[in-house]
C-alpha cells in the first residue's frame, strides 16, 4: 500500500511561485506514473501534469503549459510540482496521485491507484 503525502501549498500573490512536494512510502515510485490533479470549488477534478514511471513521457494541461513543471525523483521516492507565474484561476486543492502503469495519461481516474490528502493552493489577485 503506497501512501502519498503532499506539502507546500499556501497563499501566494498572483505572479508568484509555489513548489508542491509529494512524499511516497510503502512502495517505489519507479513503478508508477505520477500525476498532479487539482479541484476547484464546484469544478471537476482535472489532471494538471503527469510524468511516466521511467520519466520518459510528460503531460501538461493547456492552462499550465510553460508555467508548471513536474519532476519525479525515484531515488528519493518523491515528486514535485513547481508552479510559476501563478494566476487566481490556479486556486484549487492539489492532489498527487500514483498509477501502477508505465504511462497512465488518458486512463480514467479509476486507474490512479493512490492519492494524497490534498493541499490547498490559493492565489490572490
Image (tube, rainbow, N blue to C red):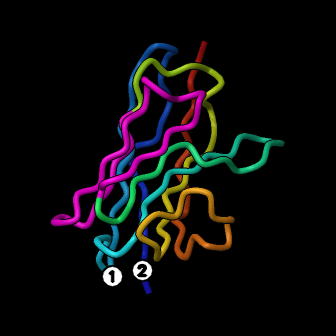
Where is residue 8 shown, x and y percent of the image? 39, 44
Where is residue 32 shown, x and y percent of the image? 39, 71
Quadrant assignment, res 30? bottom left
Q: Which mark is residue 96?
A: none
Looking at the image, which residue is at 62% across and 21% down? 88
47, above or below 31, in the image: above
- Is 118 a magenta residue? no
Q: Mark 2: which secondary structure?
A: loop
Q: Is residue 16 left or right of residue 97?
A: left
Looking at the image, which residue is at 39% across and 32% down? 18
How packed mark 1 is, by other alpha carbons closer than 10 Å (few <14, some 14-19, many 20 or more), is: few
Residue farthest to the left, as pictured: 75
25, above or below 94, in the image: below
Q: Nearer the viewer, residue 16 or 100?
A: 100
Looking at the image, which residue is at 34% across and 75% down? 31
Q: Which residue is mark 2?
A: 2
Whether label 1 touches label 2, CB < 8 Å: yes
Where is residue 108 shown, x and y percent of the image? 68, 65
Residue farthest to the right, as pictured: 42
Q: Mark 1: which secondary structure?
A: loop
Looking at the image, which residue is at 61% across and 73% down? 111
Q: Quadrant of the C terminus?
A: top right
Q: Which mark is residue 27?
A: 1
Q: Is residue 11 left or right of residue 51?
A: right
How packed mark 2 is, by other alpha carbons closer than 10 Å (few <14, some 14-19, many 20 or more), is: some
- Is 73 a magenta residue? yes
Q: Quadrant of the N terminus?
A: bottom left
Where is residue 94 shown, x and y percent of the image? 55, 47
Question: Range of the magenta residues?
Answer: 55-82
Q: Nearer the viewer, residue 82 or 69?
A: 69
User: Label 1, label 2: how many angstroms apart (C-alpha)?
Assistant: 5 Å
Amino acid at each position: 500500500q503506497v501512501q502519498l503525502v503532499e506539502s507546500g501549498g499556501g497563499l501566494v500573490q498572483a505572479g508568484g511561485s509555489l513548489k508542491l512536494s509529494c512524499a511516497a512510502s510503502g512502495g517505489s515510485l519507479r513503478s508508477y506514473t505520477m500525476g498532479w490533479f487539482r479541484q476547484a470549488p464546484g469544478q471537476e477534478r482535472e489532471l494538471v501534469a503527469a510524468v511516466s514511471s521511467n520519466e520518459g513521457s510528460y503531460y501538461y494541461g493547456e492552462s499550465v503549459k510553460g508555467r508548471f513543471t513536474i519532476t519525479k525523483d525515484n531515488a528519493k521516492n518523491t515528486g514535485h510540482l513547481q508552479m510559476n507565474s501563478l494566476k487566481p484561476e490556479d486556486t484549487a486543492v492539489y492532489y498527487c496521485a500514483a498509477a501502477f502503469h508505465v504511462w497512465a495519461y488518458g486512463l480514467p481516474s479509476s486507474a490512479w491507484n493512490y492519492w494524497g490528502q490534498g493541499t490547498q493552493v490559493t492565489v490572490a489577485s
